Image: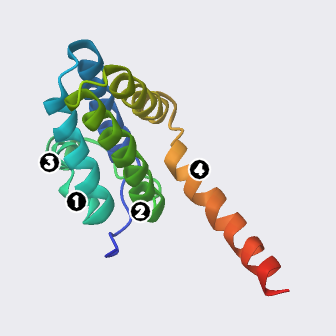
Amino acid sequence: MPADPPVDPRGPRFSAWMTTVVLALVLVTENWRILAAQTLIFALCAFVSLRLNPYGLIYRKAIQPRLAPPEELEETPPLRFAQGVGFVFALVGTVGYASGLTTVGMVATGCALIAAFLNAAFGFCLGCEMYLLIRRVAPALAGRRAN
């Protein structure tokens, strides 16, 4: 993955609010095409660059210029990992809805919605926390295998 520069942490929270709205709309309408669009956004952010997030673009162009500079910036690898987790749930949801497995679509979308809402409302990024946990556990597991 190419490296993205550190970001203003308010941008990902704004994006999480937008994602929350989109995912709630999907649950209400059961429209897999809307979820497919969100899946594409997750994929672009996870596998190409966070700068391709349209919600982030709105934040950078319309909101960030009106705010004071952030006190600190956030590293992007955990954010990109979180987008990858969102991609997996959204992809499962899209396939579920599109193939007539509505319950699968609803559960996967609901899981993604909960994660997006936690980030938006409380600044708690489940995917970011998963990334940090994996980074801590992986070296310990590698050390055990070497012995």
- Crowdedness near tag 1: few (<14), some (14–19) or many (≥20) residues, C-alpha within 10 Å: some
- The vertical placement of 145 against 129, above or below, is below
The percent coordinates of residue 144 (x first, y second) are: 82, 77
Q: Amino acid at mark 4?
A: Glu
Which quarter of the rendering shows the N terminus? bottom left
Measure the alpha-carbon separation of dots 1 and 4: 21 Å
The percent coordinates of residue 77 (x first, y second) are: 44, 65
Measure the alpha-carbon separation of dots 2 and 4: 13 Å
- The vertical placement of 76 against 102, above or below, is below
Instruction: Tell me which label, 1 or 4, sits earlier in the chain.
Output: 1
Which residue bears the numbered disc 4?
129
Instruction: Tell me which label, 2 or 3, sits earlier in the chain.
Output: 3
Instruction: Tell me which label, 2 or 4, sits earlier in the chain.
Output: 2
Q: Nearer the viewer, residue 120 or 133?
A: 133
Measure the alpha-carbon separation of dots 1 and 3: 12 Å
- The vertical placement of 128 against 106, above or below, is below
- Crowdedness near tag 3: few (<14), some (14–19) or many (≥20) residues, C-alpha within 10 Å: few
Q: Is residue 141 left or right of residue 39?
A: right
Query: Which secondary structure, mark 2?
Result: loop
Which residue bears the numbered disc 1?
51
Residue 76's mark? 2
Instruction: Tell me which label, 1 or 3, sits earlier in the chain.
Output: 1
Task: Give residue 102's quadrant in the image.
Answer: top left
Query: Which secondary structure, mark 3?
Result: helix
Task: Give residue 147's quadrant in the image.
Answer: bottom right
Q: Amino acid at mark 2?
A: Thr
